[in-house]
Amino acid sequence: MNTATTMLEQSINLTISPRLAKNIRRNIKERIIEFMLMLAALSAVFTTLSIVGVLLYESLSFFKTVSVVDFFTDTQWTPLFEDAHYGILPLVSGTLTTSAVALAVTIPIGTIAAIYLSEFASHKTREIVKPILELLVGVPTIVFGYFALLFLTPILQKIFPDLPGFNMLSAGIVMGIMIVPYIASVAEDAMRAVPMSMREGSYAMGATRFQTAVRVVTPAAISGIVAAYILGISRAVGETMVVAVAAGQQPIVSFNPMESAATITAFIVQVAMGDLPHGSIGYQSIFAAGLVLLMMTLCFNILGHMLRKKYHERY
Amino acid sequence: MIKPTTPIKAESRNLNFFYNGGNHALKSVSMPLYENKITALIGPSGCGKSTFLRCFNRMHDLYPGNKYQGEIVMHPDNTNILEQGVDPIEVRMRISMVFQKPNPFPKSIYENVAYGLRVRGENNKRMLDDKVEEALKGAALWNEAKDRLQDLAFNLSGGQQQRLCIARALATDPEIMLFDEPTSALDPIATANIEELMSELKQKLTILVVTHNMQQAARVSDYTAYMYLGELMEYDDTNTIFTRPSRKETEDYITGKFG
């Protein structure tokens, strides 16, 4: 009580010594640096926002001509024909089917690769295998597209003689292989982040390596593994070149991977490379299609975010 | 030394251990573990006591390049468990371990305790129910856990988690239980609970415990070994070690002049 009063009285006569005063030059410099860092960070945000803006703006004029109900219910997508129909369903079905095939390939392979790399491979093996796996990421997607069309499809045609030259099966499988490194790499990071003490606990109970990997490490890393799957889904849904080259261009509503079909992305490429006049309804349709694509990836990302939160790891 | 009333359950004979890279962590350690007794390992950090303990369930096998030399003989099998032909998984099924930090699995309380049985292929629901209840009772956790067996194990407090880890280790009826500083992450009340539990457990099994806490060694153990720089300096019954140690180094350590 006594000391507090004395301190209060003293504080009235205090001054700021020049040696302790704020350094204005340094402060300004800091502010400038901070501002520039913020600009760099915001550039990504602005780009995203302007993409969304352009998509919305162009789609809006598209939806002035085509009703939203028709867009989502019509089963024909023929914007370039005389008798134009604007039903997005064929493109959505194409996108979902190729993505489903890709995921059916990539999730098992990617997960098994991650389990192997994280729990079974020796340090040396991992150091060799992981870079090779990641090399796959660097292969241009057009190469994968022609690999599907000219290499895998003929092989598949030997097994299924009725398979058309352009088909979703071949495109989906190759797309799945293409995504494996993404899933394997992210899932492996998540599994390696599981503390060693948890593995030791499992081994000390007499568990084998495989039991430890499947029953302890995988559930402990599940949020990271789910994140890897979501990344894979977004990649598959947004993939363009492989499907444009190998899956064909006919927009039909079909969930049969043995058929040829167009995806949203393949259609956008087709139109963007064609000679449709700017501002025509056909041209605007690619923005509406792009908006649907964006919504789909957004949904998957939100779903992934929710799953990650639900299974958030706690060690 | 007071002669034990029980046979030797396991003993190390001239045990040497080399970590990957050549660090000679244990130097010719020979000592017995008497059945139904608690043996405590004390000594300053880095003296090799945890290394010694982890030889008993072949934990060092998990990391490449580690090398054992010498014997750990388990009775009544009369087998050197460090031998090439011995399966470490079989060893771990009979010698279980409780770690320094509670390390429950990301599963329910029930599944944590059932884990050891499940990896042995036991899936009979009634059998598992019985074993889980028995183990949780044995680890003095049953009353707190019986209404929340399906809760995630991480929702338990630190002390409860450690008792869960003891229950997990108990569920498979091990013959020896290794405790690696089991209370160093716990508060004094949780520590007292675990110590009491250890004293009860020795009716059923043999215990080897590493501790940094000398009072703990004095309170719970029947025999105490003092280790320093990878060597066993002194081994005797706990009372003798703490009242009339025969070596100056041991006395300096337990009186706090050193370490």
Image (cartoon, rainbow, N blue to C red):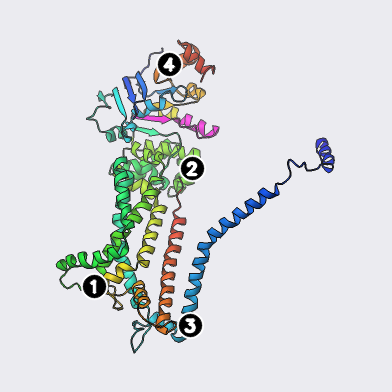
Q: What type is the residue that disc 1 sits on?
A: Phe
Q: What type is the residue that disc 2 sits on?
A: Glu
Whole-number angstrom distance, CA of label 2 to CA of label 4: 36 Å
Which residue is under mark 4?
B237
Whole-number angstrom distance, CA of label 3 to CA of label 4: 90 Å
Q: What type is the residue that disc 3 sits on?
A: Ser
Q: Are marks 1 and 4 in contact (CB under 8 Å)?
A: no
**Same chain for marks 1 and 3?**
yes
The disc, 2 or 4, on the residue closer to the chain's N-terminal end is 2
Which residue is under mark 3?
A61
| Label annotation for residue B144 | 2
Is residue B194 found inside the magenta-colored segment of the image?
yes
Q: Could you say which is closer to the camera, residue B79 or residue A196?
A: A196
Q: What type is the residue that disc 4 sits on?
A: Asp
**Same chain for marks 3 and 2?**
no
Vertical position of residue B69 compared to residue B131: above or below? above
Front label number (3 vs 4): 3
The part of the chain drawn in magenta is B175-197
Element marked by disc 2: helix
Q: Mark 1 lies on which chain?
A: A
Is residue B221 found inside the magenta-colored segment of the image?
no
Q: Mark 3 lies on which chain?
A: A
Element marked by disc 4: strand
